[in-house]
Image: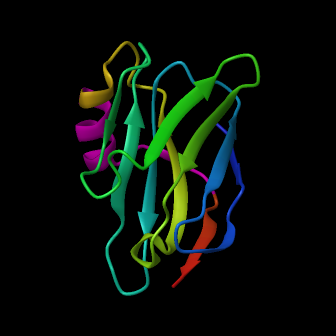
Amino acid sequence: QVQLVESGGGSVQAGGSLRLSCAASVYRFCMGWFRQAPGKEREGVAAIGSDGSTRYADSVKGRFTISKDFAKNTLYLQMNSLAPEDTAVYYCAANPSLRGFSGGYCWTTLSAAADNYWGQGTQVTVSS
């Protein structure tokens, strides 16, 4: 059983920064961040593979950074230059069955997998 506990959401003005954290029990496998805005479908934001390679949605590339801290068993999403369109509930996802894969593969597979573990979500609100 993988437990994911998110933190770090909040309200910020456009141009500001936030860092989301996802405490995970074990995470040497595909992990990622997703988000869901009101009235929209959930979408992938970033993914990281077992080798530390990453993949991002085009809308956040250059602004967001996904990373892992193995010592702290924590997945992070550093979000800079936030814009109102980044407002959403952000979810951490993990899939223990996906081990040894790159960030690109994790990006594709996490988006389609039905057996992901999910965090409870954390709200990010960006005002203009």
Does residue 56 appear in the picture of this structure? yes
Residue drawn at point x = 25 percent, y = 29 percent: 104
Total residue callouts: 0
Residue drawn at point x = 33 percent, y = 80 percent: 40
112 in magenta: yes
The x and y percentages for residue 26 are 64, 24
Does residue 1 appear in the picture of this structure? no
In the image, is residue 96 above or below residue 82? above
The x and y percentages for residue 86 are 44, 69
Quadrant in the picture for residue 17: bottom right
Residue drawn at point x = 61 percent, y = 53 percent: 119
The x and y percentages for residue 98 are 38, 24
Quadrant in the picture for residue 110: top left
Pick the quarter of the image with the N terminus. top right
Pick the residue in front: 101 or 83: 83
The x and y percentages for residue 53 are 37, 21
Pick the residue in front: 113 or 21: 21
Q: Which residues are magenta?
A: 105-119
In the image, is residue 106 above or below residue 52? below
State the scheme by which the image is colored. Answer: rainbow
In the image, is residue 57 above or below residue 89? above
Whether residue 5 sits left or right of residue 31 in the image: it is: right
Instruction: Identify the residue at the far right of this view.
Output: 72
